[in-house]
Image: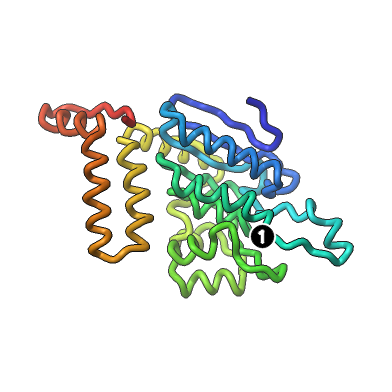
Amino acid sequence: MAHEELTVETDQAVVTIRLTNPARLNALSTTMTAELIEVLTEAAGDPAVRAVVLTGEGRGFSVGADLSELEEPYRRGEPPPPSGFLKAGYNRLIPLLVEMPKPVIAAINGVAAGAGISVALACDYRIASDTATFTTAFVKIGLVPDAGSSYLLPRTVGTARALELAILSDRIDAPSAQAIGLVNRVVPGRALLEEATELARRLAELPTAAIGLIKRTFARAARSSLTEALDLEAEAQDEAAATHDHLEGVLAFLEKRQAKFTGR
């Protein structure tokens, strides 16, 4: 299916989604956001998809909201309330990434700003080009972090660092982002997609049903007491133990051979 502001490529079990509005540094327009929601919903439900790579085209990963879509009311001095836009767009998009029942890798090729950082944070792994830069940006236009940043950023870098990034909104480079845990790895730009794809293929060969359960259990445990987390683990373990991959993994261990996981 053709898309206006995305390209989607499938290679075996890995789907690569590329944001393709480089002239606007892949700003998250209404169209791009809707297309992402559609593609990610399909990927979540497709058993043949076992890993997802999300990247951008050109100099930007994504600079967040496409403010040009709202230029007319701003010039009239009538800024629209953002809540409707957020609920229809980001508030549907971000949970799709966080709750995707298979691993998602952000290959951050350039600037990530505003909701672009939120999108990266919602992914499970973040690999950045050595030329990538990061800024929360919201405060620079008198707004608060949205698209899940208020939830995801403190859980990624800690509350004190998250407040510093949100309030001062300094631009940081890729090595600095790695040093504070904002990204997992920094690689030369020319190797970015190769590294991300290699990781995606490695993840796709693992028991991805278990990976989905790990993601879900970690998310729920973060909002639970220790006793509740122990119960969540027990419930998730029952689900994992009922999968074909668990049976295959145990038999492969007993038979001293390489396991062949299928994500079931």
Residue 187 appears anywhere in the view? no
Query: Where is residue 117 drawn, in percent x and y?
Result: 57, 56
Q: Residue at x 21, y 29 (%)?
A: 248
Residue type at mark 1? Ser
Q: Secondary structure at mark 1?
A: helix
Q: Is residue 167 left or right of residue 152?
A: right
Q: Is residue 260 left or right of residue 171?
A: left
Q: Is residue 68 left or right of residue 16?
A: right
Furthest-right residue in view?
Answer: 76
Position of residue 72 relative to residue 199, above or below, is below
Position of residue 42 relative to residue 142, above or below, is above
- For disc 1, the marked residue is 83
Position of residue 83 relative to residue 206, above or below, is below
Q: Quadrant of residue 226?
A: bottom left
Q: Residue at x 63, y 68 (%)?
A: 144
Q: Residue at x 66, y 70 (%)?
A: 139
Tell me which colouring the rendered structure shows: rainbow
Q: Residue at x 48, y 26 (%)?
A: 11
Query: Where is residue 137 drawn, in percent x and y?
Result: 65, 64
Query: Where is residue 251 drawn, in percent x and y?
Result: 15, 29
Location of the N terminus (image quadrant): top right
Query: Where is residue 43 drawn, in percent x and y?
Result: 49, 34
Residue 160 appears anywhere in the view? yes
Q: Is residue 106 left or right of residue 227?
A: right
Which residue is nearer to you in this view: 212 or 157?
212
